[in-house]
Every structure is written in structure tokens, then in C-alpha cells.
């Protein structure tokens, strides 16, 4: 299975690295891999300044089993890039799962793959997404599943969405193992020790 | 304020990118910054394959206000690198806060900055850390604070540790704003919508 995470200048760091950690952990020991896909092989400068080298360029990836589009101010800028939009549209058409984190949903809407479907996005951007008039925007959910389209809300919710995705791709045991590995079994507040 | 995150080959992606997201978000609009510090300026290949360019090399950073040492198999390997160990030891001595995520605590123990203090680490590595015989290893906490030493448990707990750190560095309002921005107010299970 080939899982692709699209990255671009201005991509929000945790939007794609949370999912990368979860999905790549699940792929270990399986015939599956996660690729960071850039517009080209040129280094990508993320929203908070981290500089990452893509594993592969868009042009070399005609098809994926799973596409994940993260957010950040770059996701809204990428909407103005016809090559990125066309690639998302083309690859999404053949994907088992098409997913977004945070404002990555704007790019999915812009690529026309969301028309008439239910999505969510970062809680500060739900109104703006709704104004695009293409999708039914849901508020207050960590992530929303509509057919093969899965959209997560703000930044950290991509982690939870990907644990759900791992369960669907590889089974509950795999998801449970990854959650244990990344210690994402969030305990009640007050479990820290201070002093 | 200068916050440094040490990165090295084999560093676990979420261990340092969760903290980077939290700390860099808090630094926006303040006279503070977060630097990714490499052994050199050469690209770092992380545990799950992500390739990152350090912002700066160790040799050019003689002092920091906050040091964060993430984990991953590379943290245990870095213990065998005398230059890395000496740098951690030297910089830690002048830091306001010395922090680790996951098995980054091994590197802090190896650098002798933990002797006799209370620390935690990834739940699969608490026994191994205890065997080093240098620190009192606590189990079951998301993070542990002992004076200016703060150690987080597995992978995702670094996010919570850094929210706590932001509160201590910049105040409760700042921490609350970052938590809202990254949507890390984890709701009860069942808030996802499926179907």
C-alpha cells in the first residue's frame, strides 16, 4: 500500500508529521510505505520554519492508495497553483482514501473532490470553508468521514484521524499498537507530576 | 529567548515536531525563537525517514535558554558520540530549562545532567533507563518536573510537556492560545462522526 502526504511551502508542521508518525509506524513490517510528496524535489519550508526534503515529486506519483493533504497557510496558497490542484484532483480520483488535516480541506474543495460532501476543518476556518459553497461543513468534530473522504479538524486531530485510518487499513490491533507506541492514550488531566 | 531542539539521525519525528509546533506557535509575536540544532548543518534523517535540514549546527550554539532533547533510536546512538554528549552537557549547564521527550532522557542521563534527579521516559524504556543507575525513574506520568529538568514520557506527551512549558515561559494565556490553535483540547472519545 502506498500512502502519500502532500507537502508544500507553508505546510503546518504538526499537520503532516503527526499523521506521518502514525501511518509510518503502522507500515513497519508491512508491504506499505508513506511518502512525503513535494511539488518538486526542492526543499519545502514549513509554516513554522522547519525545512524538509520531499521523498518524491508530484510528477512521479500518478496514483496512491491513500492521499493526505495537510493544512497551513500554504494550503490556501496552493489553491492558486494549477499544477498542485490538478495533481490532487487526478490522484484523488483513484484513491481508496482521500484525507485532509486542518485547512488541507480547502485544497480538496478547490480540487473539486468534495462537492456536496461533508467535511470539517480547523475551527477558526469553518466559516471561510463554508463560504466556498462546495461542501457541507461540520463543526465540533475531531474528524468527519463521508464515504472515502476523511477530514480532520485542527492540527493535532490529524493524529486521531490517522489512528482511525490505521484501524481501517490494518485492523484494530495495529491501531492499538501505534497508539501505545506514540503514547496517545490521553489520560485524565492531573497525571503529570510537578515539583 | 532562544529555544533549541537538538536533532540527529534516528530522531523520532513526532518527538521533536510536536514540541516545535507548540513552542514556535508560542514564540510568534514575541522576541523568541525555536531553532532546530543539528550535529552539523548536514541533513538529518529521522527515525521514520523524514529528512530535515537543521537551522544551525551545535558548534554555533554555545548557550540556550531552553534545550529540548527528543528521542528515537538515534538518541541512544547519540550517547556514543562524544561531541554530542559534551555539547548537551555544556549547554545544559547554562539553561533555564533542560527538557527531554521519550528516550531523549537517555542522552540527558549520558551527559550527566540528571544525576540523582527524577525523570521519565517512554514507557517501554523505563527499565533500561533505570539500569543506567543515574536517576530516579518515574513511571506512569505524562511528564516529570524536577527543578529545571522536565522529561516527557512517550512521543505525544512532548506536546503536553511543551504546553506546560509555554505556560511557565509566557503565561497561561499563551498556553491556552496555543492549545486552541493546535486543537489539543482533547474531547471525550466519541466526538468523531463516522458514516
Image (cartoon, coloured by chain):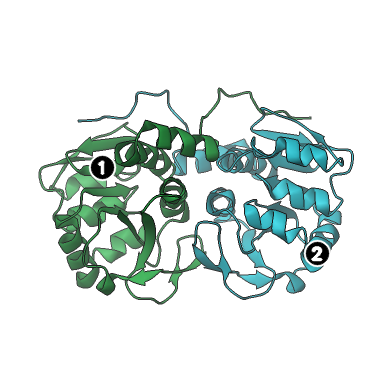
Chain colours: A green, B cyan
How packed mark 2 is, by other alpha carbons closer than 10 Å (few <14, some 14-19, many 20 or more), is some
Could you tell me which residue is drawn at 34 percent across and 48 percent down? A101
Q: Is residue A39 above or below residue B2?
A: below
Could you tell me which residue is drawn at 80 percent across and 43 percent down? B148
How packed mark 1 is, by other alpha carbons closer than 10 Å (few <14, some 14-19, many 20 or more), is many
Q: Nearer the viewer, residue B126 or A184?
A: B126
Q: Is residue B120 above or below residue A193?
A: below
Q: Are marks 2 and 1 in contact (CB under 8 Å)?
A: no
Measure how far apart labels 2 and 1 are at the Cα level. Answer: 44 Å
The percent coordinates of residue B68 (x first, y second) are: 69, 52
From the viewer's perspective, tell me whether residue B38 is left or right of residue A111.
right
Could you tell me which residue is drawn at 27 percent across and 73 percent down? A60
Residue wearing tag 1: A150
Q: Chain of mark 1?
A: A
The percent coordinates of residue A95 (x first, y second) are: 20, 53
Q: Secondary structure at mark 2?
A: helix
Residue wearing tag 2: B87
The C terminus of chain A sits in image quarter: top right
* Count of residue discs: 2
Q: Is residue A40 above or below residue A94?
A: below
Amino acid at each position: 500500500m502506498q500512502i502519500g502526504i502532500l507537502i508544500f511551502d507553508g505546510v503546518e508542521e504538526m499537520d503532516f508529521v503527526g499523521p506521518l508518525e502514525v501511518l509510518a509506524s503502522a507500515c513497519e513490517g508491512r508491504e506499505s510505505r508513506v511518502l512525503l510528496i513535494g511539488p518538486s524535489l526542492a526543499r519545502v519550508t514549513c509554516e513554522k520554519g522547519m525545512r524538509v526534503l520531499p521523498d518524491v515529486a508530484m510528477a512521479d506519483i500518478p496514483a496512491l492508495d491513500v492521499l493526505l493533504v495537510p493544512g497551513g497557510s500554504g494550503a490556501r496558497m496552493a489553491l492558486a497553483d494549477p499544477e498542485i490542484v490538478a495533481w490532487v484532483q487526478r490522484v484523488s480520483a483513484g484513491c481508496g482514501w482521500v484525507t485532509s488535516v486542518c485547512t488541507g480541506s480547502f485544497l480538496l474543495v478547490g480540487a473539486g473532490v468534495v462537492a456536496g460532501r461533508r467535511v470539517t476543518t480547523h475551527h477558526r476556518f469553518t466559516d471561510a470553508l463554508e463560504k466556498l459553497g462546495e461542501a457541507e461543513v461540520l463543526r465540533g468534530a475531531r474528524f468527519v468521514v463521508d464515504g472515502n473522504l476523511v477530514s480532520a479538524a485542527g492540527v493535532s486531530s490529524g493524529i486521531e484521524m490517522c489512528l482511525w485510518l490505521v484501524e481501517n487499513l490494518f485492523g484494530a490491533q495495529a491501531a492499538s499498537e501505534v497508539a501505545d507506541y506514540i503514547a496517545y492514550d490521553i489520560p485524565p488531566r492531573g497525571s503529570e507530576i510537578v515539583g
